[in-house]
Image (tube, rainbow, N blue to C red):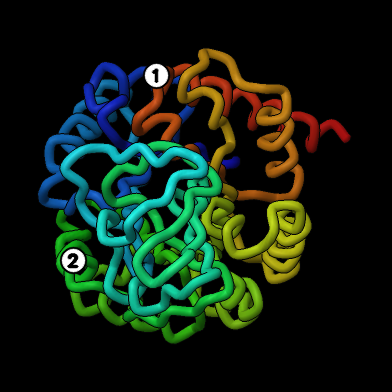
Amino acid sequence: MTEIYGTLGPACARPGTLEQMLRRGMTGVRLNLSHVSLREAAGLLEALSAAAASCGVRPRLLIDMQGPELRVGALPEPLPLKEGERVALASLPLPGAVRAALAPGQELLLDDGKLLLICETADAARVLRGGVLKSRKSVALPGKEIRLPALTESDRANIAAAKACGVTGVMQPFVRCREDLRELRAALAAAGGEGIRLFAKIENREGAERLPELLEEADEIVIARGDLGNAVPLWELPALQKRIAAACRAAGKPFMVVTQMLASMEHSPVPTRAEVSDIFNAVLDGASSVMVTGETAAGEYPVETIGYLARTVCEAERFLRDN
């Protein structure tokens, strides 16, 4: 059976909403710890517990760590970036490691690549693809490698609290090598979380290239197409997804497919045909789980999103049984 994951957030923070999502087929949830700690998310976890009790189920709980991910800092308010305008880099709360790597001609991708800037000088950039930048959104520098520790101090604090909070799995972002996973495994063991499963998110070229060694260390591989789609040209992403899926099948390793599976449903009660086909094909490729993120965390139709996700998965599983 393919696991159906939603992501916790303001759009599904009420027990009644979560109960409907569970009844529609959601079997697990993701909590993004790039924006909040486990302790700070106590209200969301209590709502999930109440909803699960009403349904008589025990959903899986995955926590998505910060890891070696680059993000913008806090903004006093969302920042509009208009295509063609020149922006002072000092107005963007960029990590120090990013600022040090910027040079004229360097592209800067923000919010999973939705916004694109190019540095013109050491102090300013031109907006090539505009939008609204919000706090804590991802940052990527195509062609640049910035080495950061596998775990942050907040990651370690969340790991220490994981077992007590009922966490069943930890998602490690931007996995680069087996050492990243071994460091996380050791931290879990030290916190008494030996039974917590380890999900390795493939989000960069290094992780994709070193997949064979990651297959030996992880309990499940995550094909995280958001940042992975920043690391390679978008037209190369489908083939890369197929190659990762094939390697997981050959190794007998479960894998998850995530990112923009039902992105249109953040603002629409029905998905596109292409999105439904994407989910269907992920199951046909052997995905053990599929996940939606912003669709349920911040979207307008979290219950309907899970309904379409679960029904499409069921139809794909029926197709596999009958053919």
- Counting from the top left corner in percent of width and height, residue 44 is at 19, 36
In the displayed structure, does residue 222 sit left or right of residue 132? right
Compared to residue 210, the image places residue 279 above or below, namely above
**Residue plotted at (26% across, 77% down):** 187
Residue 300, labelled with which disc? 1
Instruction: Please identify the quadrant where the N terminus is shown.
Output: top right
**Residue farthest to the bottom, as pictured:** 179
SS state under label 2: helix
- Counting from the top left corner in percent of width and height, residue 263 is at 54, 31
In the displayed structure, does residue 182 sit left or right of residue 33? right
- Counting from the top left corner in percent of width and height, residue 157 is at 15, 67
Q: Quadrant of residue 90?
A: bottom left
**Residue plotted at (58% across, 36% down):** 261
**Residue plotted at (38% across, 66% down):** 69
Whole-angstrom CA distance, mark 1 to mark 2, is: 30 Å
Compared to residue 267, the image places residue 234 above or below, namely below
In the displayed structure, does residue 292 sit left or right of residue 282? left
Of the numbered discs 1 and 2, the one sitting upstream in the chain is 2
The kind of residue tagged 1 is Glu
Category of crowding for the residue at label 1, using alpha-carbon neighbours closer than 10 angstroms: few (below 14), some (14–19), many (at least 20): some
**Residue plotted at (24% across, 56% down):** 73
Instruction: Please identify the quadrant where the C terminus is shown.
Output: top right
Category of crowding for the residue at label 2, using alpha-carbon neighbours closer than 10 angstroms: few (below 14), some (14–19), many (at least 20): some
The kind of residue tagged 2 is Ser
Front in this rendered view, residue 78 or 39: 78
Q: Name the residue under label 2.
A: 154
- Counting from the top left corner in percent of width and height, residue 264 is at 55, 25
